[in-house]
Amino acid sequence: MKDFISLHDCSREEIDALLKLAIKLKDENKKGICHHHLKGKTLGMIFTKSSTRTRVSFEVGMTQLGGYPLFLSSADIQLGRGETIYDTAKVLERYLDGIMIRTFSHQDVLDLAQHADIPVINALTDLLHPCQVLADLQTIYEHKGKLEGLKLAYVGDGNNMTNSLMYGCAKMGLDCAVATPKGYAPDESVVELAKADFQKSGAKLIITNDPVEAVKDADVIYTDTWVSMGMESEKAERIKLFADYQVDSKLASNAKSDYLFMHCLPAYRGYEVSEDVIDGPNSIIFDEAENRLHAQKAVMVTLMGDK
Ligand code: CP
Ligand code: NVA
């Protein structure tokens, strides 16, 4: 594994190994055991979109591993003024040991990884958010003691989270049911690629417009904002269109009684999720947020650690 760009590119064994390492690093961290696996190494962190969790968890994670995180806002580097991805890759590989990038175009991340001889980590594009889903798989495993055989229901906008969740469920053998309004289904090419992995793992994929059908007997209910970064101009229209897709206690009552509520955050209470659900006893949103730290440390150690 040179890069971490899509869970589809990882084998089930690789994801398993990342999850095991994440859990080990988390345990060591809680016990105060120092693990400077990346001593003297530097991670460049390119952001062309906002972030709270991703920025802080990568910076803290790199620091805990004995390395140095270098925040590179696109507003401050020449990439933001039109320098090419190619030149940026060829220059940054001379200074850095790894690059983490959050940006709009998924192709830009693929190009960066192709041209940079150092590991590239996808920290969210318009298409995918694999770091979040790796942390989510860790969180589900910690709460349920298994992944295979569970059912995850995603309700809302078919976006980068939906795409990565489908890839993650397909690889790890969770049934995945996605309910979106018409016209907001997840990316077709992602669905096609995920289908092959669902077949391999024996898990089921359901794509529907009916949230009740999706949530029925689910172990996990997942939702995300209706207005992803870059879609702000569609906000009013989306709020109207998505009104029947709020995860509230009535919808959640179709799930198993011990269902987990998950959300990558940031959340907008009263829109994609009601307050009683997101702040209720089934919600594990802050465990998910914490696990970003541990899961990404596992990714960095795997990609950037001495072999
Ligand atoms: N979930 C997530 O990626 O959060 P941020 O946008 O705050 O990084
Ligand atoms: N779908 C959201 C995820 C934020 C972490 C977005 O892209 O804005």
Image: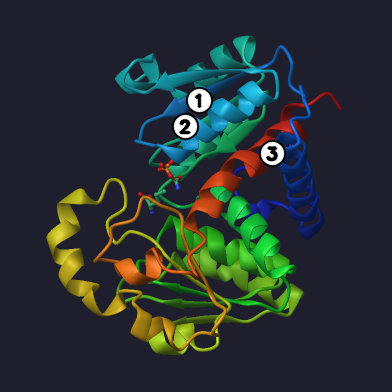
Q: Quadrant of residue 5?
A: top right
- Say which residue label 3 marks: 299
Spatial separation of the CA atoms under disc 3 and disc 1: 14 Å
Q: Is mark 2 within 8 Å of ligand 1?
A: yes
Residue 191 visible in the shown view:
yes
Tags 2 and 1 in contact by the CB under 8 Å rule? yes
Q: Give the amino acid at mark 3.
A: Val
Q: Give the amino acid at mark 2.
A: Arg
Which of the two discs, 2 and 3, sits closer to the camera? 2
Q: Residue furthest right?
A: 307
Residue 158 visible in the shown view:
no
> Up-down: is 133 above or below 52?
below
> Up-down: is 117 above or below 220?
above
Mark 2 residue element: helix
Mark 1 residue element: strand
- Say which residue label 2 marks: 55
Q: Give me the residue at 56% from left, 31% from top.
A: 58
Q: Give the amino acid at mark 1.
A: Met
